[in-house]
Amino acid sequence: MSAPFAIQLDEVSLARDGRTILDRLSVGIPARGVTALIGPNGAGKSVTLRIIDGLLRPDSGSVRLAPGRRAFVFQRPALVRASAAANLALGLAALTLSRRERAERVAAALERVGLSDRANDAATRFSGGEQQRLVLARAWAMQPDLLLLDEPTASLDPAATETIESLIAEMARAGTTVLLVSHNLGQVARLAEEVVVLSAGRAAERGPTRSVLFSPRTAEARAYLTGELPWTSFAAAS
Ligand SMILES: Nc1ncnc2c1ncn2[C@@H]1O[C@H](COP(=O)(O)OP(=O)(O)OP(=O)(O)O)[C@@H](O)[C@H]1O
C-alpha cells in the first residue's frame, strides 16, 4: 500500500439485482485526519463503508487496509439490551485490559459524552441523541486506528452534534484515521481535510475540503453541491 493511505480501494465493483452499485471504484484514504465521503442518495457511500469494514464482499477489485483496530458507527445506533456501562464494556471485550482498566475506560467515556449519571440505565431506552453519544463514546473508548462513521449526527440536536464533532476531532488528532459519510456540509467543512465525492458508484472528484466544496471541478460534484448548498443556487440565480 502506498505509505500515506490507510485504506486503498482498487477497481472495486458491486452489483445487486442486476444494478451496478459500485463501478470500479478506486480511492485512497489518507492515514491522517478526517476524510469525508459525500455524494447524493444512493451513490454507494454506506456500501463503501460496509465493504471497508468487511461486512460486504465486493464482486471484484481489492481492498487494502493498514493493520489495526476498527470501529464502525452506524447511522442507527447498534446497542444491546443492557445498561449504558455494559454496552461500553462490551465494546472493550476484545481488548486486553484488566478489569480495573476497563472500568476506568468505561467511566471516562461516559464522562466524555456527559452520560455519567446514566451509566446504569438501559441503553436501548435512551433517546436517539443519547444513544448516538453512547456509541461514539464506545468507539472513543476502543481507541481504534480506523473510525468509520455513517452520518453520525443525523437527527441530533446542536448540542449533541457539537459533542460528537469534538469527539471525532479529538480522535483524529490522537492519530485515528477517520472516514466520515455525511450530508451535513457544515460538518464536513468543520471536520474534514479531504473530501471524496461519490457519484453513481465512482469517485467523481477528490481534493482538499474547501476547494471541493467551494470550487468543484466536475459536473457530478457541482450537481450534488448545488442541491445541498441552497445559497449556491441563490447566488447563481441572482
Ligand atoms: N443489500 C443490498 N441489496 C440490494 N441493493 C442494495 C443493497 N445495499 C445497498 N443497495 C443499493 O445500493 C445503492 C447504494 O446504497 P448506499 O446505502 O450505499 O447509498 P448512500 O450513498 O449511502 O445513500 P444515502 O445518502 O441515501 O444514505 C442504493 O441504490 C441501494 O438501494
Image: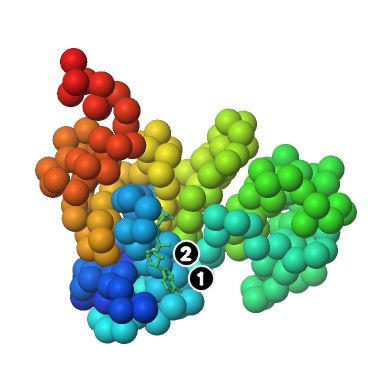
Residue closer to the observer: 99 or 134: 134
Is residue 238 shown to the viewer in this render? yes
Kindly identify which numbered label has been placed on residue 56: none
State the image coordinates of residue 181 (x, y, percent, origin top left).
41, 53
Q: Quadrant of residue 193?
A: top left
For this view, does 23 lie left or right of residue 6? left
Locate the C terminus and report the quarter of the image it occupies: top left
State the image coordinates of residue 211 (x, y, percent, origin top left).
19, 38
Q: Is residue 211 above or below residue 230?
A: below
Task: Report the residue that reaches farthest toward the front.
Answer: 18
Q: Measure how far apart labels 2 and 1 are at the Cα level.
A: 5 Å
Q: Is residue 232 above or below residue 93?
A: above
Dot 2: what SS?
A: loop
Q: Which residue is mark 1?
A: 69
For this view, does 153 lie left or right of residue 118? left
Ligand number 1: quarter of image: bottom left
Task: Report the residue that reaches farthest toward the right.
Answer: 120
Dot 1: what SS?
A: loop
**What residue lies at 72% left-to-right and 40% top-to-bottom?**
114
Residue closer to the observer: 225 or 33: 225
Q: Which residue is mark 2?
A: 145
Q: How many marks?
A: 2
Residue closer to the observer: 225 or 28: 225
Q: Is residue 229 above or below residue 86?
A: above
For badge 1, the amino acid type reads Arg
For badge 2, the amino acid type reads Asp
Which circle's residue, 2 or 1, is located before the other in the chain? 1
**What residue lies at 19% left-to-right and 41% top-to-bottom?**
222
Dot 1 crowding, Cα within 10 Å, few <14, some 14–19, many 20+? some
Q: Are marks 2 and 1 in contact (CB under 8 Å)?
A: yes
Dot 2 crowding, Cα within 10 Å, few <14, some 14–19, many 20+? many
